């Protein structure tokens, strides 16, 4: 890339990181807002995403280093820019010649260029001579490390942490066959320079390898031809196995990705009742599923921790409750410092209530699919064990296909996915069948 494109990427990442800190929004949301305003070049935007990903991983280390070197001699904005560049270089990203980068940044940022950074420009050159940072458990809170040790064992936990620090998350898409045939969607993707690689683990799931023109990719996504969804979420719906003609209750349905995939598997035949507690999310959800071509969805705004205003006895209940997101430490590195033990306990209490309510709406012979993007025991195996002790009318049901790893505590019917093994979010899935 030429220095101007690199400078544009650094500026986008800097502006997004600054907005992330000021407005307390995610880095991803901040970059989206900045890119909408500035309309950057495709390659610059792609590099900016990469810069922010490694900034999220390394920024605590970089901030501590700069505090020791510079202390309070420059403004926070200047430290942020230096920190961003340091994190990028230390993660192995080639930003080109530092002097050319600085000149390009001056031209691009103009009045926004932090002048007090000038005396420290030479520091950037020394960054190139420092060894690349090796993945370190110190980037994780001690309680998270202990949890990973308990779940995976010490050696495997270190493999997971090393993998998460050294590999960028993959992007998966599914084809919306309600709107077009797979052949037509793949043909348009090929014409648009969108490179999709078939993932052999599940039908209809593709790895997004590259997009020559991001605008054409965005167009296919906005027209709902391509559905961006992590592999773990796709597997959760395949494990639930909704069939044409069934009555399905989708609890905590927003934003709608699983609902759409369930509707595709049902070939738009049957009924899906989607429940969410937020009226605004329900409205957004309904618009999204209608745009995707689903005609069998009815939305219900209700609190799934209390009795639902429904008499429905469903063939299938899909429950994907709010969780601590400990399975997202790869995709969202900032969670490594944000999620606390109290969040795990809080969400586990919420999940117990939702599971109890959801189970009341499973017909005899029907099933309930429970999934979370958490890898903690409290939100998964321990919760399911307690539920089965209270409800002998339910039993664990074998999941097909058997991907990932067995559940813990002897729960072989349940499935677990881990980033370093399955190249997706950390995930837990259990399927329960009602016997009487």
Image (cartoon, rainbow, N blue to C red):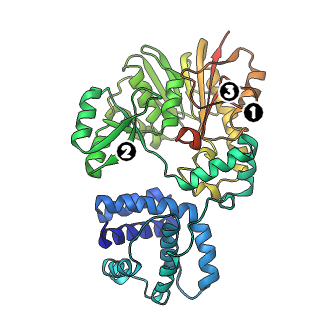
The residue sitting at the left extreme is 191
Q: Which residue is mark 1?
A: 382
In the rendered image, which residue does mark 2 sit on?
Answer: 209
Q: Is residue 171 above or below residue 369?
A: below
Residue, x 65% and y 26% (percent of image)?
A: 414
**Quadrant including the C terminus:** top right
Q: Nearer the viewer, residue 164 or 228?
A: 164
405 to the left or right of 124: right
CA separation in Å, label 2 and label 3: 41 Å
Mark 2 Cα-neighbour bin, 10 Å: few <14, some 14–19, many ≥20: few
- On the question of residue 240 being in view, the answer is yes
For the residue labelled by badge 1, is the local secondary structure a helix, a strand or a loop? helix
| First reached walking from the N terminus: tag 2 or tag 3 | 2
Horizontal and vertical percent position of residue 73:
57, 88
Depth check: give the residue in front, 340 or 403.
403
Front-lying residue, 285 or 306: 285
State the separation of the CA atoms marked 1 and 3. 15 Å
Whether 202 is drawn above or below 145: the answer is above
Instruction: Residue 25: give x, y in percent of width and height.
Output: 50, 60
Mark 1 vs mark 3: which is more N-terminal? 3
Q: Which residue is mark 3?
A: 356
Is residue 231 found left or right of 417 in the rendered image? left
């Amino acid at each position: 890339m030429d220095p101007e494109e690199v400078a544009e990427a650094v500026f986008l990442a800097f502006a997004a990181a600054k907005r992330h800190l000021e407005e307390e929004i995610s880095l991803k949301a901040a970059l989206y807002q900045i890119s909408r305003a500035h309309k950057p070049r495709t390659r610059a935007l792609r590099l900016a995403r990469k810069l922010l990903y490694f900034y999220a991983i390394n920024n605590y280390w970089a901030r501590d280093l700069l505090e020791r070197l510079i202390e309070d001699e420059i403004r926070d904005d200047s430290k942020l820019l230096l920190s961003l560049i340091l994190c990028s270089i230390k993660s192995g990203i080639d930003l080109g010649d530092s002097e050319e980068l600085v000149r390009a940044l001056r031209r691009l940022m103009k009045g926004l260029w932090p002048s007090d950074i000038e005396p420290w420009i030479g520091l950037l050159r020394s960054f190139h001579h420092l060894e690349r940072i090796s993945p370190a458990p110190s980037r994780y809170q001690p309680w998270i490390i202990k949890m990973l040790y308990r779940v995976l064992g010490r050696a495997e936990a270190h493999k997971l942490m090393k993998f998460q620090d050294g590999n960028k998350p993959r992007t998966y898409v599914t084809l919306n066959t309600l709107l077009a045939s797979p052949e037509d969607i793949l043909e348009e993707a090929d014409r648009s320079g969108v490179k999709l690689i078939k993932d052999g683990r599940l039908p209809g799931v593709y790895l997004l390898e590259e997009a020559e023109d991001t605008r054409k990719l965005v167009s296919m996504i906005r027209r709902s031809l391509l559905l961006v969804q992590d592999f773990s979420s796709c597997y959760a719906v395949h494990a639930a196995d909704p069939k044409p003609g069934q009555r399905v209750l989708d609890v905590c349905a927003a934003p709608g990705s699983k609902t759409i995939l369930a509707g595709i598997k049902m070939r738009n035949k049957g009924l899906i009742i989607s429940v969410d507690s937020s009226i605004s999310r329900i409205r957004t959800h309904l618009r999204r599923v209608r745009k995707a071509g689903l005609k069998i969805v009815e939305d219900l705004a209700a609190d799934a921790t209390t009795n639902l205003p429904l008499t429905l006895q469903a063939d299938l209940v899909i429950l994907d409750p709010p969780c601590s997101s400990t399975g997202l430490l790869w995709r969202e590195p900032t969670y490594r410092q944000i999620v606390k033990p109290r969040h795990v306990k809080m969400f586990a209490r919420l999940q117990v209530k939702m599971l109890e309510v959801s189970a009341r709406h499973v017909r005899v012979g029907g099933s309930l699919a429970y999934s979370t993007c958490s890898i903690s025991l409290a939100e998964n195996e321990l919760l399911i064990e307690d539920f089965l002790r209270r409800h002998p009318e339910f039993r664990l049901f074998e999941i097909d296909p058997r991907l990932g790893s067995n559940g813990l505590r002897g729960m072989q019917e349940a499935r677990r996915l881990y980033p370093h093994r399955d190249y997706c979010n950390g995930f837990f899935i259990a399927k329960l069948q009602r016997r009487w």
